[in-house]
Amino acid sequence: MTPQELENLAHLRRARDLIDRDYAQPLDVPAMARRALMSPAHFSRSFRAAYGETPYSYLMTRRIERAMALLRAGATVTDACMAVGCTSLGSFSSRFSEIVGVTPTAYRTLEHAAVNAMPTFIARARSRPSRQTASQHPQSRIEEAGAALAQ
């Protein structure tokens, strides 16, 4: 990688960290692009090239991931929806079903004893929703670092 590519990746990581930290806040692509010190169009293209999904898709996946944890803990679907920053219950339910494969209500009623028995960091990694397989794009910073070291 060139020094410029490494610098761009560092800027993209700042934006991804913003999403991971402030997922429940109102975030839009221009705000994320500002964090990455890029124009919105360039940021969207670069983010997708680096992480395999658009910034908004990444944001929604993180929100669904957090909602899954809330639903496992017994929160209502409406409470989980609002707690992760979604304002439309219908859009939240549609996206949840698309990513997880079941409705939020069905997910809430499933047995989660195995996940609840795991340490939190393992449960989070094992239950993380994903649109692509790990062979297509790294799903965690640990896998990302391992792939970078292997090169």
Image (cartoon, rainbow, N blue to C red):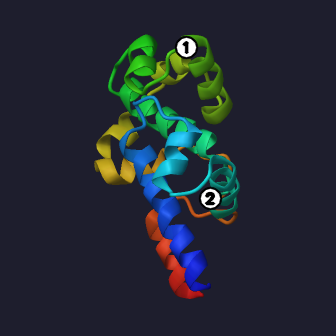
Q: Residue at x 58, y 40 (%)?
A: 29
The location of residue 28, given as percent across then percent down, is: 54, 35
- Please name the residue that numbered disc 1 is placed on: 88
Q: Would you place residue 74 above or below residue 64 in this image?
A: above
Asked whether 6 or 31 is in front, the reply is 31
Q: Residue at x 46, y 52 (%)?
A: 35
Q: Residues within 10 Å of mark 1 (few under 14, many from 20)?
A: few
Q: Tell me the tag on residue 10.
A: none
Q: Would you place residue 84 above or below residue 143 in this image?
A: above
Q: Would you place residue 112 above or below residue 132 in this image?
A: above
Residue 140 visible somewhere in the drawing: no
Q: Amino acid at mark 2?
A: Tyr
The location of residue 86, given as percent across then percent down, is: 49, 22
Asked whether 38 or 18 is in front, the reply is 38
User: Circle 1 — which element?
Assistant: loop
Asked whether 110 or 37 is in front, the reply is 37
Whether label 1 touches label 2, CB < 8 Å = no
Q: Tell me the tag on residue 51.
A: 2
